Image (cartoon, coloured by chain):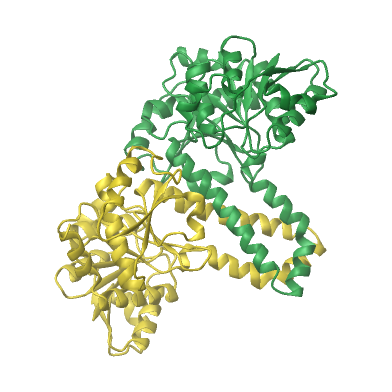
Chain colours: A green, B yellow
Amino acid sequence: MRIAIDAMGGDNAPECNVEGALSAAAEWKDTQIVLVGDEARLAPLLKNKPDNVSVRHAADVIGAEDEPVKAVRRKKDSSMVVAGRMVREGEADAMISSGNTGALMTTGLLIVGRMQGIERPALAPMIPTLDDVGVLALDLGANMDATPQHLAQYALMGSVYRSKVHGIQKPRVGLLNVGTEPGKGNELTKEAYPLLENLAGIHFVGNVEARDVLTGNCDVLVCDGFAGNILLKTLEGTAGAMFKLLKEQFSRSLKTKLGAAMLMPELRSLKGKMDYKEHGGAPLLGLSGLVVKGHGSSDGTAVKNAVRQARIALMADLVPSISKEISGK
Amino acid sequence: MRIAIDAMGGDNAPECNVEGALSAAAEWKDTQIVLVGDEARLAPLLKNKPDNVSVRHAADVIGAEDEPVKAVRRKKDSSMVVAGRMVREGEADAMISSGNTGALMTTGLLIVGRMQGIERPALAPMIPTLDDVGVLALDLGANMDATPQHLAQYALMGSVYRSKVHGIQKPRVGLLNVGTEPGKGNELTKEAYPLLENLAGIHFVGNVEARDVLTGNCDVLVCDGFAGNILLKTLEGTAGAMFKLLKEQFSRSLKTKLGAAMLMPELRSLKGKMDYKEHGGAPLLGLSGLVVKGHGSSDGTAVKNAVRQARIALMADLVPSISKEISGK
């Protein structure tokens, strides 16, 4: 299989992407990795290039500040758009990018193309849970507004992903809501509830409150992109704020410094646990090809993990399986 | 001034309400406290009742499980509804209840009554921030769906509250959103942004991302009730989960136990800091009288703090000030 990596995307590009590509190529000999980007910048980093790594030149780059739709339309030779075109034209089986999120979603829609029957593709990262299993949340930002029908499609796509990629037999689907009772919520969630309840092919477990998401009581969490963003960013902000406060409190006196030093490995492990960025790339579901978004601050390990994820999804026939599930409805 | 307390509302009722009432009455001799509830249950707790505490008998109670609208309509002799009626009829200047939140909002709307010119009253708790100042967030659950016009009214009411009750001269108003740039958001926030930007009488500082709320970059945070609930519950859930994890990690070995013991006062202080329940009662803004919601798990101190809050709001003419601000628009 061939996986295209947008070599110029991400805060640490192109180094992180080259490092991830080399390490993935070493581990999976059956996988061809194509680094898409500026040949002149990539060549010095690829002096000992193995056979299953190649470079596809792309002269342009979409930056973090670029306006997504404009950038994708105009920068036809950017590494991200070229990688997308490779997927559309069957030159690559999947693409991975840690670049501008909005531009990647636009590349997915305009270049790779929407899957037939899907109204809105969805971005689906894993949110960490206390039991370390994690929950796949979607949509987390591809579409700010959603209809109940969109939420039903998210539920289907998320279920297929969890079963195909993570091997969960009957993924539990929860609806992000303000209370657990069926009648709770805003207009969107009140209408979505009976739709999900009656949807064949998913195992709906009802409403899930935001405070319970971390306890891992579902495998797929369905929400509109706005609410999902509030959830994820609050989680990130609260964890960050608490670590900042702990650090302040723990450097107050010799006694607290000593206590903190004794707890350092435990504190570090907790920090890793709460960091959703460490939980792999986020697939963009509902496209006619496989697109995986890495986090902007991805390092080589994160890029390699995204390759691992893409391989599993490809081997499990993720995209055809979603298509089959959707067309069956 | 006279403040009615729903003596039967809250997990620890009636004891917490009696304790809070007695302690408030002792501190503020100018304040008449009326405990509304079952006389037979209250009498034994009020053996040494000071002159400024009295009981108004109410035979019935609205429970935590009661369906709000039905309960308020049918239980006309419940402590909550009787307290609401006292406010409407001028027998009390304010009411405080730690009972069923939905029922209290219904009591506000149906019994106390909406302020003229207000489309939707809003529940406005304080969310803790790292600088200990806190941010008043509204709406946090009175209405699940909102229009841009509702958000503009929330902004006005929140600004008046922060300036009158907390003495902030020019409260900074932020709009909860998924990015800081003006064009970001869902349909609601995209339409609300220019409305807030052009609203006389508030100091709008733009969009605020969920991850930055805790850093205290605004004094009033405006959002619809659904998004607000996701924010508050995620904050609560994340903090709770982290304390649970810390506890687990810290009891792993003798070394970690010793380290944790050395840090105990700091950990406790952090826990208090992150607990929004410790940040006083939440006013229900936009009613024709003052209604303050205490948290369900309120103890005597929390009830006393709610009385303190109600006193300040009454002395500062909060309700007439909001009415003046709204009718001027």
Quadrant housing the N terminus of chain B: bottom left
Q: Which quadrant of the view contains residue B299?
A: bottom left
Question: Which quadrant holds residue A83?
Answer: top right
- The percent coordinates of residue B294 (x first, y second) are 37, 66
In the shown orientation, is residue A251 left or right of residue B36?
A: right
Where in the figure is residue A187, as x and y percent of width and height? 31, 38
One can see residue B285 in this view: yes
Query: Can you give x and y, in whole percent of width and height, for residue A165 in the image?
Result: 64, 24
Q: Residue at point 74% right, 28% down?
A: A18
Q: Which of the pair B83/A289 is nearer the observer? A: A289
Relative to A51, A274 lies left or right? left
The residue at the point 36 percent across, 29 percent down is: A147
The residue closer to the viewer here, A295 or B268, is A295
Q: Is residue B151 visible?
A: no
Q: Quadrant of residue A247?
A: bottom right
Residue A34 on image: x %, y %: 71, 18
Quadrant location of the C terminus of chain B in the rendered image: bottom left
Task: Point out the residue furthest to the right here.
Answer: A48
- Rendered position, A97 above or below A328: below
- Nearer to the camera, A94 or A155: A94
B302 vs A19, nearest the viewer: A19
Residue at image coords 78%, 55%: A265
| Count of number-bearing discs | 0
Q: Residue at x 63, y 31 (%)?
A: A9
Asked if B78 appears above or below B192 in the picture, the reply is below
